[in-house]
Image (spheres, grey):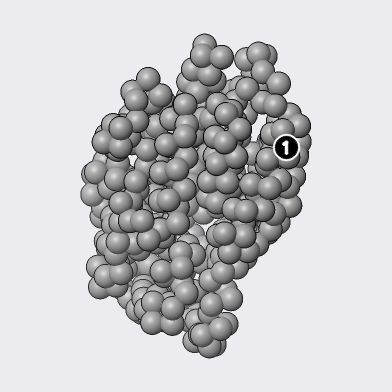
Amino acid sequence: MKVAPVLEAVRATGKFNSILVHTGQHYDANMSDVFFSDLDMPQPDRFLGIGSGSHAEQTAKVMIEMEKLLAEEQPDLVMVAGDVNSTLATTLVAAKAGITLGHIESGLRSFDRGMPEEINRIVADEFSQFCFVTEPSGLNNLEHEGISKDRVFFVGNTMIDSVQKYLPNARERFVELGVKYGIEAKKYALVTLHRPSNVDEFPALTRFVELFERMSAFAPRMTDHGNRITDHAFRILFPIHPRTRKRLQDFGLNDRIRSNQRLALIDPVGYLDFLALQDSAGVVLTDSGGIQEETTTLGVPCITLRENTERPITVEEGTNELIGLDMERALELSKQALNGKWKSHRVPELWDGHAAKRIATIIETAL
């Protein structure tokens, strides 16, 4: 969803030969292949087939394969997006080969170097000749780190380009999804959890199981526009990351979480389906970075279950509330959101659906 708009905009100029590379770091079909079809992306020109592994293993494998590819193709520009291991690996290979690098979603910082993503972001920005920034905090962060201003471009958020383009299609799908999952618009909570700090330790994951139980208990007492929500209406919908599903099994929590009649564990869904589920949710609870941005654009209350965020604009201007692991706060905010009470918010500057076109114009002019 970050790359698709840029690829489309670059190809629309007619000035570039472009090669789309899928490293295979995200290898689950529900979390990778379906995105290509949902986002009308062509099949990758190259698939590296990296698969799972530790941070070091994934990074090393991408570096080995990317070095071969870049030596063969000799590109004038390599574009990377976000903060995953593939971004770090490609950055290092391109920098050592002396190839111009562009970083989509540059300048974001959590200031927590215990997060692997923070290391990846810092390295990508350090070696990028084109730092494409999504929000004002990114400008400040890059300036503080000594990145020359002639390398920095405030263009907006390409992921929001995708949201705006595909939201009508996503909304059409909600009727079917509502029937499939037994949910009603604004009468369910949508949950995503996958960060190691939240799911890899028994005490942390148990706290979330308890939170869902307490949310289920208060559900019948909630109101919607002054009308009592019937007992059967409220649901907690949890598209569960493979990592999180495995941890529930490892920690012996499966029976307990399945006994929660209001909680529906479902497999990961494609981009359009998840966008539809976000758009119609009463509240979203997440530890993901990108979801904080999407919910802000959609105007949907978001509770971020982390101690920090690299996307402060979503808290300052958007719908996001950053609460750490304060489960009492999560419970109270969920009640407020599901009763239609939330803080004022707005869509941040340049999150207007045209970020990718700005990027294409910049690189066309520069190259």
Residue 220 seen in the current view: no
317 over 5 or under it: above or below: below
Residue 128: image location, x then y, percent: 47, 31
Residue 93: image location, x then y, percent: 60, 40
Which residue is at the front of the view, 222 or 75? 75
The mark tally for this picture is 1
Q: Give the residue drawn at x 37%, y 38%.
A: 107
192 over 22 or under it: above or below: below
Q: Give the residue drawn at x 68%, y 40%.
A: 67
Which residue is at the front of the view, 114 or 217? 114
Q: Give the residue drawn at x 56%, y 83%.
A: 250
Q: Quadrant of the N terminus?
A: top right
Q: Residues within 10 Å of mark 1 (few under 14, many from 20)?
A: some
Which residue is at the front of the view, 260 or 58? 58
Q: Give the residue drawn at x 47%, y 34%.
A: 127
Residue 100 seen in the current view: yes
Residue 121: image location, x then y, percent: 43, 44
Residue 176: image location, x then y, percent: 63, 54
71 over 304 or under it: above or below: above
Query: Would residue 103 be found to the left or right of residue 61 on screen?
Result: left
Q: Amino acid at mark 1?
A: Leu
Query: Would residue 261 be found to the left or right of residue 134 on screen?
Result: right
Please give the residue where the numbered disc 1 appears in the rendered image: 69
> Toward which corner of the image does residue 207 lie, by quadrant?
bottom left
Q: Secondary structure at mark 1?
A: helix
Q: Quadrant of the C terminus?
A: top right
